[in-house]
Image (cartoon, rainbow, N blue to C red):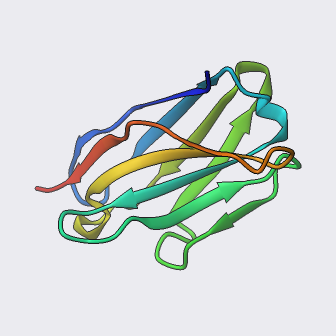
Amino acid sequence: QVQLVESGGGLVQPGGSLRLSCAASGNNFRLNVMAWYRQAPGKQREFVAHITPAANPNYADSVKGRFTVSRENAKSTSYLQMTSLKPDDTAVYFCQAYDINTQRTFWGQGTQVTVSS
């Protein structure tokens, strides 16, 4: 049973920072592409960033230069460091694991990020 648990969300003022964590279990973490998506109220879920097993990152244009995705294989954990946060970043942030061998996708339950003064 693959389980992804996000943490680190919360309320932050515009211009502030947060770091999200995604702890994985039950999967072969080293062979997973770890991704972050977000969904704002009334909007579709959208891609934010991912990091490959080789630690190559990719970002949505809207977060490039502000967010950094990383992974720590020894802890089976992926991170999303978010800086210069804007109200438009307010959303539920979801962690996703994609197993490149089985081509299966797994999701976490999400963590709320609210950017407001």
Residue 92: percent from the left, percent from the top?
31, 50
Q: Is residue 111 above or below residue 67?
A: above
Residue for point 51% across, 63% down: 48
Q: Nearer the viewer, residue 11 or 117?
A: 11
User: Is 109 on the left or on the right of 104, as rendered?
Assistant: left
Residue for point 81% across, 44% down: 102
User: Is 42 on the left or on the right of 15, as rendered?
Assistant: left
Q: Is residue 112 above or below residue 42?
A: above
User: Is 108 on the left or on the right of 65, as rendered?
Assistant: left
- Give the farthest residue toward the left: 117
Question: Residue 73 is drawn in which quadrant?
Answer: top right
Q: Nearer the viewer, residue 18 or 38?
A: 38
Quarter of the image for the C terminus: give it.
bottom left
Residue 116: percent from the left, percent from the top?
14, 56
Residue 25: percent from the left, percent from the top?
64, 20
Question: Residue 59 is drawn in which quadrant?
Answer: bottom right
Quarter of the image for the N terminus: give it.
top right
Residue for point 31% across, 59% down: 15
Question: Residue 70 is drawn in which quadrant?
Answer: top right
